[in-house]
Amino acid sequence: MTSMPELRGADPVDAVAGLVDRTIYSDPDVLELEQQLIFRRSWHFACLTGEVRNPGDFFTATVAGEPVLVVRGDDGELRAFYNACTHRAAVLTGERGGNCGRIFKCMYHAWAFNLRGDLVAVPYEEGYGPEFSKSQYALVPVSCQVFGDLVFVALDPLVPDLADYLGDMRPFLEPYVTGIEPIGRNSWVYGGNWKLWHENFRDNYHPEFTHRAIHDMTPHYADRGGNWGVPPGHSVLQWVSEAPDLAGYAKSMTRRSGVVFDSGPPSAGYADAGEERPQEVLAVFPNLDVQPGPKDGTKGERTGYIQTVTPLAVDRAKVEITVYSAADDTPEERQWALENLADSQGSWGKITCDDTEATFRCQAGVAGRGTQHNIFTRGTAPGTGGPQANGRDEYSQREFYRVYRQYMSGALSS
């Protein structure tokens, strides 16, 4: 198959109507197409510039199932290559990141490559004969560009320039991802299709029902928020974060568990119970989510996490979280950020456990054929969304599937 398949006799994605055929979450042929038509041709977050700051610093990623290597050159330039020796294809490094010094040396036959990808040493080179030239066996490059402090790579970008790819998302994203550094990382594998996980972070409709902690601590979640689809394929969720009702949460926990909980001191970062702070979740097509800290007029919004979801199989995906902070944060501020994110958003976190269960249940449900479509029709005002009566609309998912369909059909210009 080379284009968007017809499933059950109809177009599987109608982004205008907000209808998505459930088969696209469970058909292995669809995933194979997604790897070739979306993941190979789109830009993907690889790492932060702070992880590849010095010559020889490298970081690895997997894109469309293929190993990729990002490295800082001795000339200060960032480059990306396929992480595969040009001799027998052994990956040059199996490490997530580190510093290679001045060369990458293949452990199999010791072919060595410099930081610009040139093949510089071949043991017993004369055995290949007089016609052999090392210049023909340089590492194969991969497109690499930077936005803010985010490093992106693309195997075969359909939109060659990263700025064009981000499109209208740039002004939303830039303030959060400039002047930041990584301070922690977590990853896990969950039993569901990658799209279900990414949809979840474009969804402001579920938190008050799925997450008991949000329901009990912030009962007015998303009453004053917004949901925007941001071309091409991106989105912004927004809500007003109130000081959490810790006493109400402790009372709820006590009632449900039989264990007496103390609400403790007021939540750090809120001056008083009446303080409000806008918060956002930013989603970049196809699989990147950024959740910064609150917009409180300080460097707080430069603390948060970056998340990617990568398909491993049609019903299995890897979630990776990079926790970041402002470059000038103190060690104490960074420790607080790590503990706060681990408590809520790590694989074991209070929030993530709920999301994992919800998306796992969705994956189990799409295997049934009783109902054909998932429905993304909330929000009836014209345009791409905004602050409606509440922030629970689904403009963001419709924008994702509008561009998803373009990639899968090859009609990106439509």
Image (cartoon, rainbow, N blue to C red):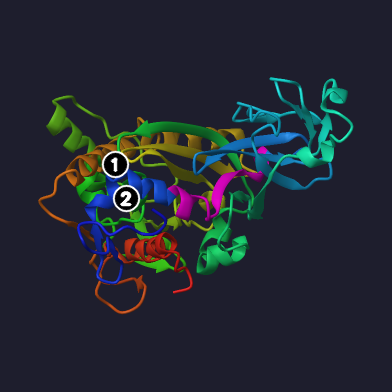
Answer whether residue 106 is visible to the viewer in this image: yes
> What is the secondary structure assignment of the residue under circle 1?
helix
The residue beneath circle 2 is 200
The answer to the question of whether label 1 and label 2 lie on touching residues, with beta carbons closer than 8 A, is: yes
- Above or below residue 406? Residue 333 is above
Residue in the foreground of this view, choosing between 241 and 382 = 382
Task: Tell me which numbered mark, 1 or 2, is placed earlier along the sequence.
Answer: 2
Residue in the foreground of this view, choosing between 397 and 24 = 24
Residue interval drawn in magenta: 35-51
Looking at the picture, how far across and down is residue 334, in whole percent? 55, 36
Looking at the picture, how far across and down is residue 206, in whole percent? 24, 52
Q: Which mark is residue 355?
A: 1
Mark 1 nearby-residue class (10 Å; few <14, some 14–19, many ≥20): many
Mark 2 nearby-residue class (10 Å; few <14, some 14–19, many ≥20): some
Q: Inspect the image, locate mark 1, and give the three-letter code of the amino acid beneath it.
A: Asp
Residue in the foreground of this view, choosing between 242 and 167 = 167
Looking at the picture, how far across and down is residue 304, in whole percent? 49, 45
Q: Which mark is residue 89?
A: none
Mark pair 1, 2: CA separation: 7 Å
Q: Quadrant of residue 66?
A: top right
